[in-house]
Amino acid sequence: MKTIRGLPLLLLAAVPLAAAPSEPLSLFGISAGKGASSLGVPMQIVILLTLMTLLPAAVMSMTPFLRITVVLHFLRQALGTQSTPSNQVLLGLALFLTIVIMQPVAAEMYHQGWEPMEAGHLTPQQAFDQGARPLRNFMVRFAREKDIRLFVEMTHAPAPHTPADLDLKILIPAYILSELKTGFQIGAVLFLPFLVIDLVVASVTLSVGMVQLPPVMISAPFKIMLFVLADGWNLVVGSLMKSFYS
């Protein structure tokens, strides 16, 4: 009895814990038991940190964020306003527009992949395959057949019979190339009216003999005035949003 009384409280508290049957730990819905199909908690933390590191690149390249940022950058260059709006403002606008567009896709991925895995109905690999279907369907809508064929030939993969047969390693880079081309096409169209203003102002200043005054300083107010009078932000953002819903 004296020996028991001399034990620290920590050891006394640990005795029933050690005697009780140990339950498998779980993190993020994945059991951490001793089975071959389970993942330990440290390994799950490593995977989570790796995914968080890759998350910004995924958001930038696998969502409408890519096209929106390219178009907004071209628009700022066409206006000739240098750093106005700032990069933070343009990226914030692009991020919130991306959230609006991708919210239904993200909700479908959550319901098809994460919820069944948390309930124990799917393994992590099956949950990944089920959750990737909505994202695959979204990217297939905007990936050009020419770009998909390019990466199928480069990877020597068998030709897919249906869009559902496309692997993500082929579909993601094809989607990125397609979005870059679409963004550059929209940016070139945005440049045309402002380029006309630059040419007119430059010809007028040269004909008058104002060689020392840069034409950009004179054309910038006219371009901003034209953009504001035409309600340019509404037109540009509205056209971008409609291009993803068509």
Image (cartoon, rainbow, N blue to C red):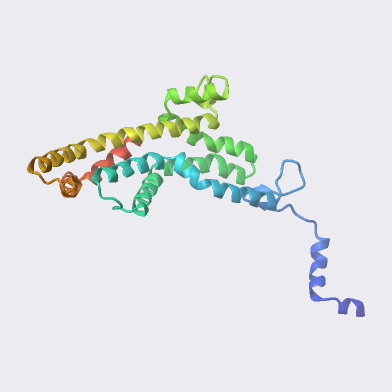
Across and down, in percent, residue 114 comes to 57, 44
> Would residue 69 appear left or right of 150 to someone viewing this image?
left
Residue 236 appears anywhere in the view: yes
From this view, report whether residue 167 is shown above or below residue 80. Answer: above
From this view, report whether residue 228 is shown above or below residue 150. Answer: below
Between 240 and 154, which is closer to the camera in this rendering? 154
Residue 122 appears anywhere in the view: no
Between 131 and 62, which is closer to the camera in this rendering? 62
Across and down, in percent, residue 155 comes to 57, 25
Residue at image coords 26%, 34%: 189
Which quadrant: the C terminus? top left
Residue at image coords 82%, 62%: 18
Q: Residue furthest left?
A: 208
> Would residue 2 appear left or right of 164 to someone viewing this image?
right
Which quadrant: the N terminus? bottom right
Across and down, in percent, residue 57 comes to 49, 44
Across and down, in percent, residue 181 comes to 37, 31
User: How many marks on residues?
Assistant: 0
